[in-house]
Image (cartoon, grey):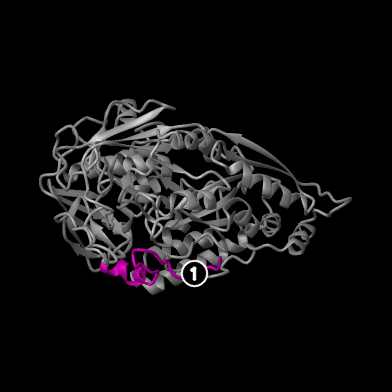
Amino acid sequence: MALEKKFIGRRGFVAGALATSAIAALSACGKKGDPAPAAPAGDEKAPAEEGKQPAAQESGAATQGGTLKIYRTNPASIDPFNAQEDQGISVVYALFDTLTNFDFEAGELKPLACESWEANEYATQFTFHLIDGAKFHNGDPVTAQDFKYAWERICNPKTTDSPSVIAYHLAPVKGYDEMVAGQADALDIECPDDLTLVVNLSASYADFPYVVSHPALSPVPSGGAAEDFQKFFLAPVGNGAFKMDGEWVDGQYIKVVRNEDYHGEKPLIDGIDFMIFKDLQTAFTEFEAGNIDITDIPTGRIGELSQRYGVSDDGYVANPGKQVINGEETSTYYLAVNCQDPAVEDKLVRQGLSLAINRQAISDTLFEGSRVPADGIVPPGIDGYKEGAWEYSKYDVEAAKAKLDEAGLKEEGGKRDLNITLVCNSGSGHEDIMQLIQSDFEKIGVAADIQTQEWAAYLDALQNGDYQIGRLGWVADYPIMDNFLFPLFFTGAGDNRSQYSNPEVDDLMNKARQTVDAAERIALFQEADKMIAEDMPLIPVMFYRHTQIASRRVNNLYFGPTKLMNFNKVWLSE
C-alpha cells in the first residue's frame, strides 16, 4: 500500500487543513447545537454536529435504549489524572467533556465544555468561557475552578507520590516547573468568575487550544469529590454524557450509564459495558457468541471477516452489514528502545536494528496488507509529515549489518555479541509481531528473546526503565506534530520511555512551541524530527489502520482516527 501524504477519509479532512487551523484556533466561538439531521437518501453525509464527533448517515430510524458492550484490556486508569493509554482514555472520553474537541468532519477544533475562547496577541494567555448550566454527575455545577483544580491535581507531586506521567501536557502553563518540583502549589490560572478560565503560559504557544482537548485535562469537582484518590480512581465523577454505574471491577468490567442531567444532546443508548478480557481471542469468541458488540479483529482474519460481515463505507462508521471498521488512524506502532541500556545505547546499534526489520512483511503476513510500513514517527495526516523522513526506518539487511559492524559488533559464524530482549503486552497479538522481528534480527546475527507481561504491569516496567526493547503505539492526543515529538522525545517527558535526551532537540522544540506562525513552527519541528531520526531512540514499525468489528445490532457508531468512539450517536437494533 503506497503512503499517502494526505489523510483522506469520510471527513474530507486533509493534512493541509491543520496548517492554518492553529492560528484560527486562537479565537473560536460556538456551542453544541441541535442534533444534526440524518442525510437524505443519496447524500454523502449529514451536517456535522458541533460536539464530540460528527453524525453519520443512519441505516434506519434510530431507536433508544440498550447497552453497548465493548472489549477492553484492563486499563491503566479511568481517572483523568493518569489517562495515558487508549483503553482507559476511551472510558474517560465517555465520562468527561474537555474544553475543546477536534472535529475530523470539519477538520477543525471546536468548543466542547466551553462556548468560546480567545487569546492575546502573543498567544501567551488564553481565556475560555464555559457553558452555563453544565453539571458534574454529583450535581455540582462545572466551574472554572474545577478545571484549575483538576490541572493542579495532575501536576502536584502531593496528589500521589509524584506528578502524573501525563502532566507534561500542562508544561506550557506558567508555574508548571515549580509545581512539579514541589516548589509551588498552584499554576498561573485565574478564575475571575465561575464561567471564565484564564490560562497564562510561560511562552507563546498557538497550539494550546489543541492541548486542552486531551481527556486528561478534563475538569474534576473541586468540592471534595476527588479528595479520596482511590475512590475517585475507581469511580470518577465526570461532566460528560455518561456516568459511572458502580465502581470499576478490576480485570472484569467498567459500566457506565446515560447521564440524564447532561447539558447537551443525550445519548440514545442506556449505557456501555466495557468488558475486560485478558486476551483478544477470548473476546472474539464472546463476540461470535453474541455477547460483545465491539472488538478488535484477531491476526490474519481481516479478509475473511470483511467478506462475512461487510466493510464500513468510509472505514469509520459501523452499521449492520457494514461492520468491519478499517479507516486510517493518526497513530504509529513502534519499538521503544531503552537508550540507557548498555546493549543499545549506541545509536549505530539502534540504526542497524531498525534497518533489519522487514516492515512490509509484517503488514502482509499479519495484517493482510492493511497497515503501512512506518517511515518515521509522524504519520501521514499530521501536518509536517515527510515521506521517508527517518533514513533508517526502512528494510536494508546489508546496511543493517554494516551499521553493526561499524558499532564494533562483528559477525562471526553467523552470530554477533548482541543479545536483545523484546518485551510486549500479552493477549493482543503483539507476540506475533515480535516473532517476526525476532526472525529479522537473527538474519543479521542478533539473538533475541521474547517476554510478555499484562498491560498495566507492562506500562509500569517501561515507565521505570525496566526493559531493553518494547513495543508501543502512539495515538495522536491532538492532531499536531508537536504531540508526536514533545511527549516521546523531550527530556524528562512522561511518555519518553526511551529515556532519550538531546539538548539541541529540546531547544528546537521549545522554540517551535513559541513560534506563532504555523509554517515556521512546523519547519522547526521538522528540523527537530531530523535530529531525532539520526539518534534513533525508538524504531517506527507501522502506521495503523482500524481493525475493529461491530455486531449487527450496532448502528451509526463512529470510530475516529484517534481511536475515540462517538458514543453519543450510536444506537442499537435487535
The span picked out in magenta is: 1-24
Left or right of 30? Residue 184 is right
Task: Tell me the quarter of the picture where residue 122 sits.
Answer: bottom left
In depth, the one of 277 and 264 nearer the eye is: 277
Query: Where on the picture, by quarter, is residue 291?
Result: top left
Q: Nearer the viewer, residue 460 or 188?
A: 460
Left/right placement of residue 385 relative to residue 116 reads right
Give the position of the C terminus as an image quadrant: top left
The residue drawn where x is 38% and y is 25% is: 249
Q: In the image, residue 241 lies at what x, y percent?
A: 22, 42
What is the residue that sits farthest to the right in this orientation?
413
Under mark 1, the amino acid is: Glu
Provide the residue designation for mark 1.
Answer: 4
Q: Count all numbered tags in the image, as a single digit.
A: 1
Q: Is residue 526 left or right of residue 536?
A: left
Residue 263 image offset from top left, x and y in percent: 14, 45
Q: Report x, y in % for residue 265.
A: 17, 48
In this rendering, position of residue 327 left or right of residue 334: left
Residue 91 seen in the figure: yes
Q: What residue is drawn where x is 61% and y is 58%?
A: 536
Tell me where residue 476 appears, x and y as whole percent. Answer: 42, 55
Judge the density around disc 1: few (<14), some (14-19), many (≥20) Cα neighbours within 10 Å: few
Q: Residue 423 occupies which quadrant of the picture?
A: top right
Residue 369 to residue 524: above or below: above
- For the stretch drawn in magenta, the main secondary structure is loop
Mark 1 secondary-structure assignment: loop
Quarter of the figure that contains the N terminus: bottom right
Magenta stretch holds residue 8:
yes
